[in-house]
Amino acid sequence: DQQVKQNSPSLSVQEGRISILNCDYTNSMFDYFLWYKKYPAEGPTFLISISSIKDKNEDGRFTVFLNKSAKHLSLHIVPSQPGDSAVYFCAASATGAGKSTFGDGTTLTVKP
Amino acid sequence: NAGVTQTPKFQVLKTGQSMTLQCAQDMNHEYMSWYRQDPGMGLRLIHYSVGAGITDQGEVPNGYNVSRSTTEDFPLRLLSAAPSQTSVYFCASSYELTDTQYFGPGTRLTVL
């Protein structure tokens, strides 16, 4: 049973437009969510996070929205840039659980 | 700070051989983890450690051993390599297990 799902394996957008990456989870105990970005041949790097007590967190061009009732979160990138082309992983954790669970990732391609 | 370092970057093994993947961090993080990433899949937790001398199993621990004798180092041992262990291995560290994780560059392992 996959507890964190990223249902879109890939997404292609035009430079300057908005990119929206989605993530669904099933475990209602999850209370902390993170997005990581990964370039080829490199390790993932932290992008942005959100606690379950919030429904939005913003950092520059990146905004994460959390809908607890739907068990859904999304990452918005505005405006998208070619350098944003990477694999984006959603991760979730529960206080006291001791580990994070990752989705399978979405490959974002931003076309110039 | 070098962050999280992993050696080797690439390794080819024959079935049945053993080897150790090295991981070190210089951020004084208590928590360290090992993940594997297979094509088209997310990061799956193999083993993790909450401090020197303390380790625990993740989702996919079979065929792997770990130990944590110092805060800085967290080696992963493959006891008898199998083709199913062909993957990219990432080591990560963090202040808290559910906190932002800092990943190494990965080790690409092929078992023939």
Image (cartoon, coloured by chain):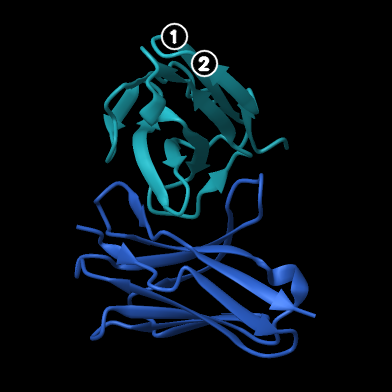
Chain colours: A blue, B cyan
Residue found farthest to the right = A112
Residue at image point 48% right, 13% down: B14
Mark 1 touches mark 2? (CB < 8 Å): yes
Q: Which residue is mark 2?
A: B13
Q: Are marks 1 and 2 on the same chain?
A: yes
Residue B51 appears in the rendering: no
> Looking at the image, is B2 positioned above or below residue A18?
above
Residue B91 drawn at (x, y percent): 51, 36
Who is closer to the viewer here, A5 or A8?
A8
Q: In which quadrant of the rendered image does the N terminus of chain A lie?
A: bottom left
Using the numbered discs, state the Cα–Cα distance from disc 1 to disc 2 in whole angstroms: 6 Å
Residue at image point 57% right, 19% down: B12
Residue at image point 59% right, 36% down: B106
SS for callout 1: loop
Residue B28 drawn at (x, y percent): 56, 34
> Looking at the image, is B9 positioned above or below residue B95?
above
Q: Quadrant of residue A94?
A: bottom left
SS for callout 2: strand
| Residue B98 disc label | none
Q: Amino acid at mark 1?
A: Gln
Q: Which residue is mark 1?
A: B17
Residue found farthest to the front = B112
Residue at image point 44% right, 73% down: A8
- Chain containing mark 1: B
Q: Is residue B109 left or right of residue A18?
A: left
Residue found farthest to the bottom = A17
Q: Amino acid at mark 2?
A: Leu
Residue B76 appears in the rendering: yes
Who is closer to the viewer here, A60 or B45?
B45
Q: Residues within 10 Å of mark 2 (few under 14, many from 20)?
A: some
- Chain containing mark 2: B
Q: Residues within 10 Å of mark 1 (few under 14, many from 20)?
A: few
